[in-house]
Amino acid sequence: MNDITILVVDDESRMRKLIKDFLMQKDYSILEAADGEEALKVFEENQSKINLILLDVMMPKLDGWSVLRQIRQTSKVPIVMLTARGEEQDELFGFELGVDEYISKPVSPKILVARVEAILKRTMGDKKDVQDYGGITIDSDGRTVKIDGKQVEMSLREYELLKYLVDNQGIALSRDKILNNVWNYDYYGDSRTIDSHIKKIRHKLGKKGKYIETMRGVGYKFEVK
């Protein structure tokens, strides 16, 4: 499932539904707004998770240009303008205001989806999923772990176990839950294999191995101290 959220802004409910249906086939999460004022409200409430906006120009209350101006005061989120007018001066005006793409209606939904994917690839493709947990840096794309900038060699299972722990930071995880989520139900031995893997991971993390706490009678918890 994609962790990408797209805000679709159009006063025509049929158009919103059409666009939404095609985008959801790609597993994108969709937010909707039927006019300019609602668009700004939805954007303000969800700004941190919106990755792209499809914004109609001609709308009641606030038109697309007004919405675009206000969003651009605080955000560089990719914005695709949708309009029934395809005049060159309108396109130039949009680019001056900070539009990333300009699509004239009517447009094939499949073509629209392809344009959306191209923009997302262009704007998000260079962003690596790298997270730091108290000096433990995990690169999810490269599946690598570094301690204070120095790479640590880990087996695939050790990496997956550590990643599961940090993804659930602060949560006490039972051994059975760890087995089910890291070993994916394909392990039929006992849970002591987790203990041996934890021991190896702690050793490789050095002083930061203390972040992995043993929860007596339960299992383990990762917490940066």
Image (tube, grey):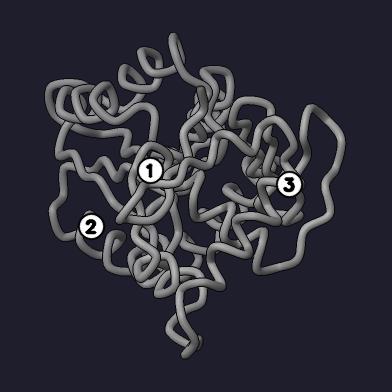
Callout 1: 10 Å neighbours few (<14), some, many (20+)?
many
Structural distance between the alpha carbons of marks 3 and 2: 56 Å
Camera-nearest label, 3 or 2: 3
Amino acid bearing label 2 = Met
Which amino acid, by three-letter code, is at mark 3? Answer: His
What residue would you read off at disc 3? Answer: 203
Report which quarter residue 147 is drawn in: top right
Look at 39% across and 22% down and name the residue there: 68
What residue does disc 1 label? 54
Pick whichever, 23 or 187, lies toward us: 187
- CA separation, marks 3 and 1? 49 Å
**The N terminus appears in which quarter of the rendering?**
bottom left
Query: Who comes first in sequence, dot 3 or dot 2?
Result: 2
Label 3 crowd bin: few (<14), some (14–19), many (20+), radius 10 Å: few
Confirm whether residue 122 shows in the render: no
Please, what secondary structure does the residue beneath circle 1 have? strand
Q: Residue at x 25, y 34 (%)?
A: 58
Seen in the picture, residue 75 relative to 203 is either above or below; the reply is: above
Secondary structure beneath disc 3? helix
Closer to us: 115 or 75: 75
Residue at label 2? Answer: 15
Q: Position of residue 171 (x, y in %)?
A: 34, 43
Q: Is residue 61 left or right of residue 149?
A: left
Residue at (69, 36) in percent of width and height: 137
Please report whichever mark, 1 or 2, sits nearer to the chain's N-terminal start: 2
| Marks 3 and 2 close (CB-CB < 8 Å) | no
